[in-house]
Image: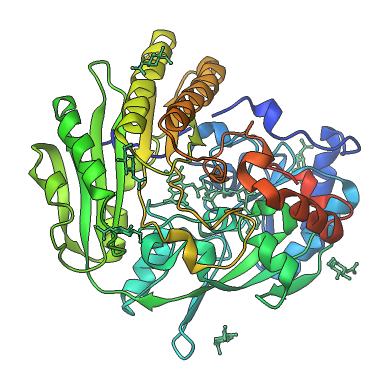
Amino acid sequence: MLSTVFLACVLALASVAHAVPGNARSSPNFNATCNEIAKAVSSVSEVFFPPSPQYAADNAHAFASSSAPSTCSVEPGSAADVSVILRILGETRTPFAVKGGGHATNPGFSSTSGVQIALARFDKIEVHSANGTVDVGPGLTWDTVYATLDESAIGVVGGRIPGVGVAGLTLGGGYSFKTSQYGLAIDNIVGYELVLPNGTVTAVTEADGDLWFALRGGLNNFGIVTKFSLRSHPQGQVWGGSIEYGSDQLDAFKDAVITYQKQNDTKAALVASVTYSPTGVVPSVVMFYDAPTQGGIFDDFLSIPAVQQDVSSRSYSNLVSSLSATNPPPGFSGFMNGIPVTNYSSTVIDALVNQTIYQGAQLALLSPNILIAAGMEPFASTLFTHGSASAYPPDRSTAVYPTVFGGAYTDPAAAGAMARALREGSDAVHAAALADGQDLSRAAVYPNYALFDTPLEDMYGANLERLRTISKAVDPEAVMGLTGGFKF
Ligand SMILES: Cc1cc2nc3c(=O)[nH]c(=O)nc-3n(C[C@H](O)[C@H](O)[C@H](O)COP(=O)(O)OP(=O)(O)OC[C@H]3O[C@@H](n4cnc5c(N)ncnc54)[C@H](O)[C@@H]3O)c2cc1C
Ligand SMILES: *[C@@H]1O[C@H](CO)[C@@H](O)[C@H](O)[C@H]1NC(C)=O
Ligand SMILES: *[C@@H]1O[C@H](CO)[C@@H](O)[C@H](O)[C@H]1NC(C)=O
Ligand SMILES: *[C@@H]1O[C@H](CO)[C@@H](O)[C@H](O)[C@H]1NC(C)=O
Ligand SMILES: *[C@@H]1O[C@H](CO)[C@@H](O)[C@H](O)[C@H]1NC(C)=O
Ligand SMILES: *[C@@H]1O[C@H](CO)[C@@H](O)[C@H](O)[C@H]1NC(C)=O
Ligand SMILES: *[C@@H]1O[C@H](CO)[C@@H](O)[C@H](O)[C@H]1NC(C)=O
């Protein structure tokens, strides 16, 4: 299962991803900033230097290519200390990075040669049963949140794979097993605690028009979030898990995906993947049903002969934990890209399969350790109707399926070829969907899947101007321009 359910992989030309504005401190002085921070923060926070184990942990990411050797790391323990740190970084114009779960798939998005902020100490989960909300810290990963909430029989709308961070997933939008039922992660936020770029600690709720709009999909452009308040939902046992098939079952798999899309049961979720192998793609599925049994919607997938199968009635957190092999294998670098489509038609599935094989075979000529896979994510047609206007998606009027195309490698020399393969393959599938008659004019690329060179217009569409205006107003000194990621 290791490399096969690999729905989310990806990499990078580190240099293009995070150019830092001109007047940044030269690198010998980064250490001076580190020491200034160490003196200024309270005792709940700490600065670490290489080669301490804390420094190593703070710099670690799921993809090796998403890590960089920072000058030091800092683990803030309070919003007040995040404020102190952000002010010093802004005043000294020192490049920095903010890490939540460390699953960024682009180099430099949560890594830096300057100051690595790791939010690990923001690890509190507070259940407020009186008003049905849960406050979670940005240092948590979703699997930990689910494991804690299972005890109280409540659930939240978050990530599907262990290790993925609450922070990054939620700042980009957030696709969940519960998205057909309740919308994106951002559609289930009731408030944020945010340290603004100028260091002011503030609460953001629906009453704050611009920041409320911008934070829901606008990534790390508006400050550092120190608390997410989530709406909770009742959560009982669920049904689901994963199945891997032989390459010879591709036709049956394809038919099952097409049939699955014709239903509207919002309690069901599916990720259907094809992974490159030298003898054809390996199909696999992750299935989810928000009840202890499924009523037949997944029978087609269950009737195809399986190579490996782990499907049962289980707790929500057990289901998510069972998917750990979907993570990149240790030591792999990688990137992802998003290919938004409105229909996993026969033509689109064929194009995804063809590109997985074609790009995989090209890359395999260059390097032996290559993984490449495409993940189809059909949701209910109503998936975007659960929330109000937000940075992403720029258009909520039609259903769009995000579709991840990802790759991983171990030889650093393969980075450029991998990025090109993902771009080329995505463009080919996009062209096939257009030729198939799909209207993709309102289909935005999911920012959390987007390859580093994706134009902002492709992710934010008509929202881009408003986001640029908000960014100028909230961050006139471009402090958040000192950290990596897609910048408005
Ligand atoms: C194996 C795998 C599975 C995935 N599964 C899903 C999925 O099911 N659904 C989905 O929607 N996406 C999924 N993704 C994509 C995922 O949402 C993004 O990779 C996301 O950025 C991960 O967040 P993180 O906190 O782990 O990452 P990080 O690398 O820690 O951060 C990502 C970005 O967020 C910024 N950031 C982090 N914390 C803060 C903060 N507190 N304030 C401001 N900015 C912050 C960082 O600076 C960085 O730019 C998956 C990715 C992988 C690799
Ligand atoms: C940075 O500062 C720390 C703490 O003062 C010190 O231990 C370390 O040697 C310095 N590193 C460099 C590269 O100057
Ligand atoms: C829910 O209750 C908690 C605890 O009383 C409170 O701090 C929080 O502001 C409330 N949230 C909402 C959205 O009412
Ligand atoms: C699913 O919903 C769409 C849109 O509401 C509708 O056109 C379609 O007939 C529904 N399909 C089923 C199987 O109910
Ligand atoms: C998806 O595409 C297929 C084949 O082109 C078509 O028959 C089907 O109606 C489409 N479904 C939707 C929801 O557009
Ligand atoms: C498969 O992809 C290759 C490379 O992009 C392309 O040349 C070929 O026409 C594709 N084949 C099909 C059947 O789409
Ligand atoms: C910090 O920024 C916010 C948002 O733009 C603004 O309201 C506030 O006045 C600023 N604070 C200071 C001290 O400049």
- The coloring applied to the image is rainbow
Residue at left 37%, top 33%? Answer: 374
Question: Which quarter of the figure has residue 208?
Answer: bottom right
Residue 378 as seen in the image, left or right of residue 52: left
Task: Find residue 293 and report its horizontal and vertical position in percent.
Answer: 15, 65
Residue at left 31%, top 76%? Answer: 151
Residue 36 as seen in the image, left or right of residue 100: right
Task: Find residue 292 and report its horizontal and vertical position in percent.
Answer: 17, 68
Residue 186 as seen in the image, left or right of residue 263: right
Q: In this view, does 130 lie above or below 246?
A: below
Q: Outermost residue, bottom direction?
A: 130
Task: Find residue 353 and report its horizontal and vertical position in percent.
Answer: 32, 26
- Closer-to-camera residue (462/238): 462
- Closer-to-camera residue (119/350): 350
How many marks the image carries: the answer is 0
Regarding residue 50, the answer to whether it shows in the image is no
- Closer-to-camera residue (370/42): 370
Residue 370 as seen in the image, left or right of residue 480: left
Residue at left 18%, top 30%? Answer: 251
Task: Find residue 281 and report its horizontal and vertical position in percent.
Answer: 26, 25
Regarding residue 201, the answer to whether it shows in the image is yes
Q: Outermost residue, top direction?
A: 365
Q: Quadrant of the N terminus?
A: top left
Question: Which quarter of the figure has residue 306?
Answer: top left
Where does ligand 2 appear, by image quarter?
top right
